[in-house]
Amino acid sequence: MFDHNAMRELAYVKADQYQRNGGGGAFKVATSTKAYYDARGYREMSAFQRAAFEARERFKQSCQFAISDFRMAGNEFDLRKCEQRDAARYAIANIPF
C-alpha cells in the first residue's frame, strides 16, 4: 500500500541532504567555518569589511545568548525558590531537641 506520509518524509530528507551537500538554492548550509567564510567571499573583503562582518556575527551571537538567558531566567528563579523552600523545610525538620 502506498504511504503518502512516508514519501513526504523521504522528500524532506532528500531536500535536507541536497542542501547540506552544497546543492543549489539560497539557503546553503555550510559544513565548516572555512566553507562559511568562502561562500560569502570573505577573502575578497577589505580589512574594514572583514572587521564589520565579524563584529556583526559576534553581535548576533551575543543577542542569541541574551535571548536564551532571558528565557531561562524565569525557570531559574522558580528553581531557586523551590530550593530555598526545601532547605528551610529540611532545617526545620532536623532541629535537634
Image (cartoon, rainbow, N blue to C red):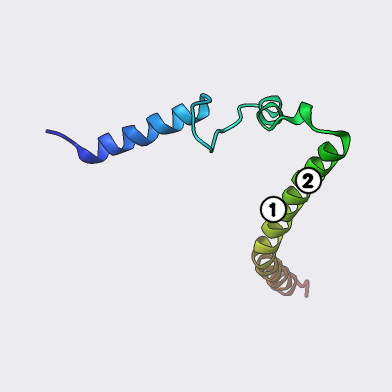
Q: Which residue is mark 1?
A: 64
Circles 1 and 2: CB atoms closer than 8 Å: no
Q: Tag 1's secondary structure?
A: helix
Reply above or below: 52 against 68. above
User: Badge 2 local density, few (<14 within 10 Å), some, or many (20+)?
Assistant: few
Q: Tag 2's secondary structure?
A: helix
Reply above or below: 34 against 56. above
Q: Quadrant of residue 82?
A: bottom right
Q: Quadrant of residue 68?
A: bottom right
Q: Which mark is residue 85?
A: none
Judging depth in this view, the residue of 79 and 22 nearest the camera is: 22
User: What residue do we see at 70% from left, 63% from top?
Assistant: 70
Q: Which residue is mark 2?
A: 58
Reply above or below: 21 against 28. above
Judging depth in this view, the residue of 51 and 17 nearest the camera is: 51
Instruction: Classify the position of the N terminus by image quarter.
Output: top left
Judging depth in this view, the residue of 48 and 59 nearest the camera is: 48
Q: In the drawing, does residue 36 fall left or right of residue 28?
A: right
User: What residue do we see at 66% from left, 25% from top?
Assistant: 35
x then y, percent, for residue 80: 71, 66
x then y, percent, for residue 49: 82, 39
Q: Amino acid at mark 1?
A: Gln
